[in-house]
Image: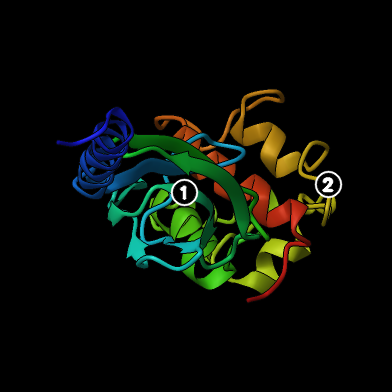
Amino acid sequence: MLSRYHILISLVLGLSLLTAVGCGTRTTLRGSIVGTVVDSQTGIGVAGASVMTSPSTSTVLTDVNGNFTIGDVQPGVYTVTAHANDYNSNSVTVTIDSGLTATTNLVLVSMGGSFARNILPIFMVNCSIVGCHDDGTAAGGLRLNSYANVMKGSRYGAVIYPYDAQTSKLVRRIKGIETPRMPKNRPALSTSDQGLIANWINGGARNN
């Protein structure tokens, strides 16, 4: 006949075994990280930005609106970093809980943008091709069809002051702070285009 002592020991061992089995079947679910990468000045999403994490999971690119999703992420704490051409990188820290999605936004500050790729096309479409500031018309002596001409300014002097978009006459005309507004007798430039020009000037108005 089993003693009370042996019965007690058997019960304790049985409970321990059940607890161990229960813990072994506990499942940790993976989560995800979603967010948007935006321009600090315009607030518009940055398309084609590269987003990665540390510890490493996967690297993804933002869509045309600056949105991204990183899936299949183990629970834990991650540093999320975004890189984009002509922008300074930025990082944020997020925590992923089991089976949940963490949402975060990354704000990138422009390094000034590219004159050839970002700025000249704006001038050509809105100011030069339409016959206001091309070689033939050059209203006010200002031609906006090349880097040299843009930096030369008008017959009244410079219209761009590198590193100082706020006081640059071209920006003040584009924003309608000074008159006549540019482009004259045409729709105002979009907020995005205005931001690109201002960022380029604040970045030094480089010929890049």
Q: Residue at x 46, y 37 (%)?
A: 104
Where 45 sits versus 144, above or below?
above
In front: 138, or 126? 126
Residue 164: numbered disc: 2
> Would residue 154 be visible to someone looking at this image?
no
* Residue mark closest to the camera, 2 vs 1: 1
**Residue located at (66% from left, 45% from top):** 198
Corner quadrant of residue 172: top right
Q: Point out residue 155 in the picture as x, y percentages from the top left corner.
A: 79, 53
Report x, y in % for residue 32.
30, 46
Residue kind at label 1, given as amino acid type? Gly
Q: Where is the N terminus found, in terms of image quarters?
A: top left
Marks 2 and 1, how far apart at CA: 43 Å
Amino acid type of disc 2? Asp
Q: How crowded is mark 2: few (under 14 residues within 10 Å), some or many (20 or more)?
A: some
Residue holding disc 1: 76
Is any part of residue 83 visible from this angle?
A: yes
Q: Are marks 2 and 1 in contact (CB under 8 Å)?
A: no
On the picture, is 26 further left or further right than 5?
left
